[in-house]
């Protein structure tokens, strides 16, 4: 009796084609891994990285991270508490270089693992194809400035996106595959994403519209119930732990009162141009892929765009207006436009499904390899050029260690307005962070001068460890208090 055995598409292709594909991916993956190493080496040298791990380090050491206006102490953590909680496993380390390197690796995993899980779900559980698309996507992702900046420097974006992707995956699993725990887990992930970065609130209308349009209207009322239940429970828990007034002041009032940059028409044009400039590699890759790898029969096309792709696309569409508004605020940037990230993953899933159609013999194999070669070459060149423009470090930056050593030798005698991590590690206390004062000044919520002065030890010397973006704290103290202590690193 003869039994038909399904032959995996990867085996059915000619050996030369498989080797050519492996060579292309390997040739692009090596410089991509080099980029990742340079980013890990550079991350400790960027002051913003040290600042963003500070709330987690403060929590580990029993310090509060949210303060009201009247408090002279200001850490300036105007995001939700989920990001500091997520980084608690690496924040207990006393050596700042080791802490930041561990945070860099944790950050890369936080960003990359959900993307792989989305690829695997979007490609119907095809692990081999998901891994191949992930390898292809590494150079493509690192060519994007938003992704580079999110790995080159710590930011809340990676955690907010990871939770957003987790919510989409769980909701998709419940609606499409009937996975019963999907609704509460998805609701919890969405709520935690909102308590990571406030812009993630767009996930609520995006998911509701998706359920309605996909024909899962019977789930809509239960979905809203779980969102309300998880949102209320998480909000209540955070308010009890961190303080209701402190949370509302930092997470809502400061942002609500921060003005837009002058000349909104010009700023809007600049942000839209940046959006195109940051995405041209992706737009070209998707356009060439959709054309070169397109199915020869129209009957195959509807199966390529799956419910998960549409869900991610809805998240991108609903986020676009709010993201543009946030990018136009003082201190905002184009990374606030989350649409890029959800759209990128949706595009990767679509390209993976097109790739599978090519392997099944429905499109030309030579065109597929040509597309792969062009995309990987462009992504490698663009990603490398953008990284070099940032002037990355080739070895681990250890300047933070020198700063900590200097601070330990001058406990209570120096004030580091731009280095709150150093003070948290050495003195177990929080001083007024310079950028926090700048942000509060923009929002017309500047703390009283007496409270700021009282939060700094009397007679302490102000010490700015360059590069510093502002010197706002100087205005609170007399000129004769501004000096450089000996042994500046």
Image (cartoon, helix red, strand yellow):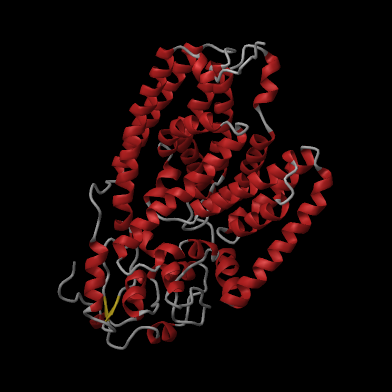
Q: Position of residue 250 (x, y in %)?
A: 55, 70
467 or 208: which is nearer to us? 208
Residue, x 57% and y 32% (percent of image)? 349
Does residue 334 appear to the left or right of 46 in the view shown? right
Residue most toward the front? Answer: 1
128 in relation to 418, above or below: above
Residue, x 30% and y 39% (percent of image)? 34
Does residue 76 appear to the left or right of 427 in the view shown? right
Total number of numbered labels? 0
Quadrant of residue 47 within the rendered picture? bottom left
Quadrant of residue 255 within the rendered picture? bottom right
411 or 187: which is nearer to us? 187
Of the 4 image quadrants, the one containing the N terminus is: top right
Does residue 308 appear to the left or right of 371 in the view shown? right
Residue most toward the left? Answer: 486
Q: Position of residue 84 (x, y in %)?
A: 48, 65
Residue, x 54% and y 50% (percent of image)? 162
476 or 77: which is nearer to us? 77
Q: Position of residue 391 (x, y in %)?
A: 27, 46
198 or 268: which is nearer to us? 198
Residue, x 38% and y 84% (percent of image)? 453
5 in relation to 46, above or below: above
Quadrant of residue 91 within the rendered picture? bottom left
Specify whether residue 33 is in view.
Answer: yes
Specify whether residue 340 is in view.
Answer: no
Does residue 294 appear to the left or right of 56 in the view shown? right
Residue most toward the right? Answer: 218
Q: Position of residue 311 (x, y in %)?
A: 67, 40
């Amino acid at each position: 009796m003869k039994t038909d055995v399904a032959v995996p598409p990867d085996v059915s292709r000619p050996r030369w084609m498989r080797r050519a594909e492996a060579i292309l991916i390997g040739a692009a993956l090596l410089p991509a891994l080099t980029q990742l190493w340079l980013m890990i080496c550079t991350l400790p040298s960027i002051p913003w990285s040290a600042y963003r791990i500070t709330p987690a380090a403060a929590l580990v050491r029993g310090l509060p991270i949210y303060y009201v206006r009247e408090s002279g102490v200001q850490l300036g953590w105007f995001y939700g508490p989920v990001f500091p909680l997520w980084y608690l496993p690496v924040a207990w380390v006393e050596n700042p270089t080791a802490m930041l390197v561990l945070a860099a690796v944790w950050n890369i995993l936080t960003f990359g693992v959900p993307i792989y899980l989305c690829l695997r779900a979007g490609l119907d559980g095809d692990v081999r194809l998901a891994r191949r698309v992930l390898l292809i996507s590494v150079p493509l992702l690192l060519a994007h400035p938003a992704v580079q900046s999110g790995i080159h420097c710590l930011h809340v974006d990676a955690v907010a996106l990871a939770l957003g992707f987790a919510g989409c995956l769980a909701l998709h699993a419940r609606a499409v595959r009937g996975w019963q725990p999907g609704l509460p887990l998805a609701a919890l992930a969405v709520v935690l994403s909102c308590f990571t970065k406030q812009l993630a609130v767009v996930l609520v209308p995006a998911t509701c519209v998706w359920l309605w349009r996909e024909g899962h209207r019977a789930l809509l009322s239960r979905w809203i119930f779980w969102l309300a239940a998880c949102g209320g429970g998480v909000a209540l828990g955070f308010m009890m732990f961190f303080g209701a007034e402190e949370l509302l002041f930092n997470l809502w009032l400061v942002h609500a009162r921060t003005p837009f940059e002058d000349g909104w028409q010009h700023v809007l044009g600049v942000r839209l141009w940046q959006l195109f400039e940051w995405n041209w590699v992706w737009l070209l890759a998707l356009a060439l892929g959709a054309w070169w790898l397109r199915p020869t029969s129209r009957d195959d096309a509807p199966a390529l765009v799956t419910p998960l792709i549409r869900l991610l696309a809805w998240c991108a569409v609903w986020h676009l207006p709010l993201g543009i508004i946030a990018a136009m605020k003082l201190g905002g940037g184009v990374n606030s436009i989350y649409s890029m990230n959800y759209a990128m993953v949706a595009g990767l899933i679509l390209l993976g499904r097109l790739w599978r159609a090519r392997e099944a013999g429905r499109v030309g194999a030579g065109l597929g390899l040509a597309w792969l070669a062009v995309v990987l070459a462009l992504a490698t060149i663009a990603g490398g050029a953008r990284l070099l423009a940032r002037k990355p470090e080739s070895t681990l930056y250890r300047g933070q260690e020198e700063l900590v050593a200097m601070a330990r030798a001058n406990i209570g005698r120096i004030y580091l307005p731009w280095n709150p991590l150093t003070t948290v590690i050495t003195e177990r206390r929080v001083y007024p962070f310079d950028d926090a004062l700048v942000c509060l000044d923009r929002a017309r919520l500047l703390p009283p001068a007496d409270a700021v002065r009282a939060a700094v030890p009397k007679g302490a010397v102000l010490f700015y460890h360059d590069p510093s973006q502002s010197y706002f704290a100087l205005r609170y103290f007399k000129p004769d208090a501004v000096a450089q202590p000996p042994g500046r690193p």
